[in-house]
Image (cartoon, rainbow, N blue to C red):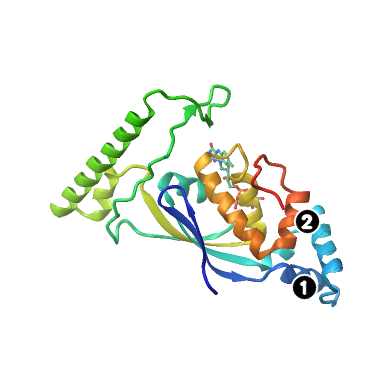
Amino acid sequence: MEPIEIKVLDKGFVRLINFLGGDETVVLAARVSTGKGLKGEEHDKKLIHYLMKHRHETPFEHSVFQFHISCPLFVARQWFRHRIASYNERSGRYVEYEDEFYLPERLRLQSKSNKQASEFGEIPNEQELLRMIQETYDLVYERYKRLLAAGVARELARAILPLSLYTQFYWTINARSLMNFINLRADASAQWEIRQYAEAIAKIFKAKMPWTWEAFVQHVWKGENPAITF
Ligand SMILES: Cc1cc2nc3c(=O)[nH]c(=O)nc-3n(C[C@H](O)[C@H](O)[C@H](O)COP(=O)(O)OP(=O)(O)OC[C@H]3O[C@@H](n4cnc5c(N)ncnc54)[C@H](O)[C@@H]3O)c2cc1C
């Protein structure tokens, strides 16, 4: 299939490289127990809504998405907590990292009401702080290269690189687990950066499994995010 790619943040992306299944596969998996197949859009859609509403979720496991992701390390660290999926990541022991660091468009303030959260607001010297961040990246990357040039091993030289460094990984996940990811990471309580990725993934999910998406938004999604609609 033709990959579907959505750019995320300043240098990242979500790329769907393979997809197996779809809405009808959910229906067929559910009806295998009764020996009945597809019954037409109206009935099949109804069944998907029934399954979703009653959290009878195993039929959704037969649809599988394979993504290629590029995101900052601190986003990947949150991402990898989602254990019901398969991961393979680029090795900083094997290859040299590129000069790719996340530079936010805007800085956010520490939230006053939630110790884990942030909020958009006025930061008078924002542009100066952003320049300082970029200078830090330039300095640290130059020193990383200097360590490598001196013969220091890649696996050790990388220890000086910041969490904003971009990494890449393959992520293979079934639709059931993907809905759990979207539920948790597209919600307003998730960090803004991973939320941008969850929204991109939600768009792809909706395009590939529109009936399942509609049922998910109606019966399961309780989060806060205007981008999550059907
Ligand atoms: C807003 C937010 C803040 C967070 N803050 C923190 C934090 O401060 N510190 C921190 O450590 N983590 C934090 N997390 C990560 C969170 O605790 C989960 O690890 C992460 O969201 C993955 O969710 P999950 O376990 O449902 O997903 P998966 O690991 O993909 O699991 C999917 C489902 O499978 C089942 N499952 C998987 N493994 C087991 C198991 N071992 N036993 C029983 N059932 C299992 C559960 O039903 C689970 O919901 C945060 C997550 C969010 C969204």
Q: Is residue 114 visible?
A: yes
Residue at x 59%, y 57% (from the top left corner): 84
User: Closer to the camera, 169 or 118?
Assistant: 118
- Image point 30% across, 57% down: which residue? 93
Q: Residue furthest left?
A: 150
| Residue 203 position (above or below residue 115) | below
User: Where in the figure is residue 222, as x and y percent of width and height?
Assistant: 72, 42
Question: Cα distance, mark 2 to mark 1?
Answer: 15 Å
Q: Secondary structure at mark 2?
A: helix
Query: SS of the residue at dot 1?
Result: helix
Label 1: how many residues lie within 10 Å, few (<14), some (14-19) or many (20+)?
A: some
Q: Residue at x 33, y 50 (%)?
A: 100
Q: Ligand 1 within 8 A of label 2's CB?
A: no
Q: Pinpoint residue 182: horizontal percent, then vertical percent.
A: 62, 50
Nearest to the observer: residue 119 or residue 161: 119
Q: Amino acid at mark 2?
A: Met
Locate residue 157, reporting x and y percent: 24, 49
Front in this rendered view, residue 73 or 126: 126
In the rendered structure, which amino acid carries the disc numbered 1? Leu
Q: Residues within 10 Å of mark 2 (few under 14, many from 20)?
A: many
Q: Quadrant of residue 43?
A: bottom right
Where does label 2 land, which residue? 52
Mark 1, residue position: 28
Q: Position of residue 189 (x, y in %)?
A: 60, 37
In the picture, the disc for residue 229 is none
User: Which is more N-terminal, label 1 or label 2?
Assistant: 1
